[in-house]
Image: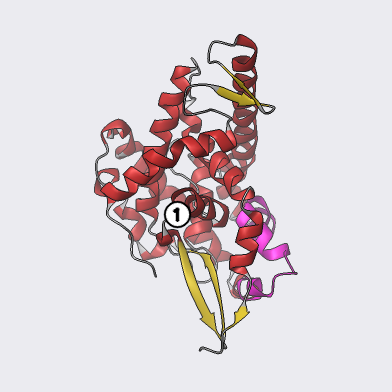
């Protein structure tokens, strides 16, 4: 595992490289200009600013659509109802309504996911149900009792987020519910509070910052490759996600765009995923096993 660099250094990287992320995703230039359709236009161009606002609105609509379905299926009321049919909860709710789980179960072209499918098959419906319920119950308490008292603009260190409750062993299920899947569940229930930390967002962070802590070198049977750091410290990721979101909010204000605070991490997820898409070939090359002769 590549050791994280000091927070101060990472924040400097985020600040320095943020203009690139803006340009590649929302089309906002460092010079406070816009670039749309290959044209460079000044900030007071009403037509181009309207196009930017429309793009932001489309992103917001997509975020709301994504979270709406998840909030229904994982609501308190539905969880109570699903306790009567845990097989349906495992296969039709947990197995279908979370992107990370659904893609892992369906992608038969990737032999690396066979282990996840085996773990999923071997986990009992009650084990999955109990773990999901614990995650949601404790997170609901965190949001109500702690998050509402945190001024996100004054978060200066990771500990300020008070996310230590996530260290509880009952909030993960070995082989089935890891950090990425849990983060998706939390994000889609509370996009204001929890960022999503999955393969695409971690690759986005890596290429955006060029920081090795977001990737990991893997060696197996004389082969090697580079993967996203699936075991990255989630509270640290949250800290950096908050910093980036504050930068985006400030940039939006320059164009008189009001960030929807209830969707705050949705904007960032869009940016990281879109940026990762621009690096598709590089990711495929890094993620491909190569024979090295080393075990």
Residue sitting nearer the eye, 110 or 187: 110
Q: Is 99 inside the magenta-drawn segment?
A: yes
Magenta part of the chain:
87-116
Name the element at disc 1: loop
Residue sitting nearer the eye, 60 or 256: 256
Q: Point out residue 67 in the picture as x, y percentages from the top left corner.
A: 59, 38
Q: Point out residue 146 in the picture as x, y percentages from the top left corner.
A: 29, 39
**What is the total number of numbered labels drawn onto the structure image?**
1
Residue 86 appears in the picture as rendered: no
Q: How crowded is mark 1: few (under 14 residues within 10 Å), some or many (20 or more)?
A: some
Q: Point out residue 57 in the picture as x, y percentages from the top left corner.
A: 61, 24
Is 22 rendered above or below residue 157?
Answer: above
Residue 152 appears in the picture as rendered: yes
Left or right of 187 in this view: 232: left
Quarter of the image where one finds residue 119:
bottom right
Quadrant, the N terminus: bottom left
Name the colour scheme. secondary structure
Q: Main secondary structure of the magenta part?
A: helix
Quarter of the image where one finds residue 142:
top left
Give the residue displayed 28% in from the left and 33% down from the top: 149
Is 161 rendered above or below residue 286?
Answer: above
Residue highlighted by disc 1: 210
Q: Is 203 inside the magenta-drawn segment?
A: no
Give the residue displayed 50% in from the left and 48% down from the top: 196
Give the residue displayed 35% in from the left and 37% down from the top: 144
Quarter of the image where one finds residue 112:
bottom right
């Amino acid at each position: 595992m590549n050791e994280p660099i000091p927070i101060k250094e990472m924040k400097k990287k985020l600040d320095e490289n943020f203009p690139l992320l803006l340009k590649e995703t929302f089309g906002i230039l460092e010079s406070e200009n816009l670039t749309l359709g290959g044209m460079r236009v000044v900030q007071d161009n009403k037509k181009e600013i309207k196009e930017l606002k429309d793009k932001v609105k489309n992103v917001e609509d997509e975020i709301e659509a994504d979270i709406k379905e998840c909030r229904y299926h994982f609501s308190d009321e539905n969880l109570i109802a699903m306790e009567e049919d845990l097989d349906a909860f495992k296969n039709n709710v947990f197995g279908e309504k979370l992107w990370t789980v659904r893609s892992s179960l369906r992608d038969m072209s990737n032999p690396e996911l066979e282990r996840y499918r085996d773990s999923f098959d071997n986990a009992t419906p009650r084990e999955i149900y109990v773990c999901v319920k614990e995650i949601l119950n404790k997170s609901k308490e965190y949001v109500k009792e702690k998050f509402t008292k945190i001024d996100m603009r004054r978060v200066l260190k990771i500990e300020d987020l008070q996310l230590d409750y996530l260290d509880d062993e009952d909030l993960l299920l070995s082989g089935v519910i890891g950090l990425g899947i849990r983060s998706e569940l939390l994000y889609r229930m509370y996009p204001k509070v929890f960022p999503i930390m999955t393969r695409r967002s971690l690759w986005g962070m890596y290429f955006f910052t060029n920081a090795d802590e977001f990737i990991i070198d893997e060696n197996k049977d004389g082969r090697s490759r580079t993967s996203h750091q699936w075991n990255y410290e989630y509270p640290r990721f949250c800290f950096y996600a908050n910093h980036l979101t504050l930068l985006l909010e400030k940039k939006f204000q320059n164009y008189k765009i009001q960030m929807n605070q209830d969707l705050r991490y949705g904007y960032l997820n869009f940016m990281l995923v879109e940026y990762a898409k621009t690096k598709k070939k590089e990711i495929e090359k890094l993620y491909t096993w190569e024979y090295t002769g080393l075990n």
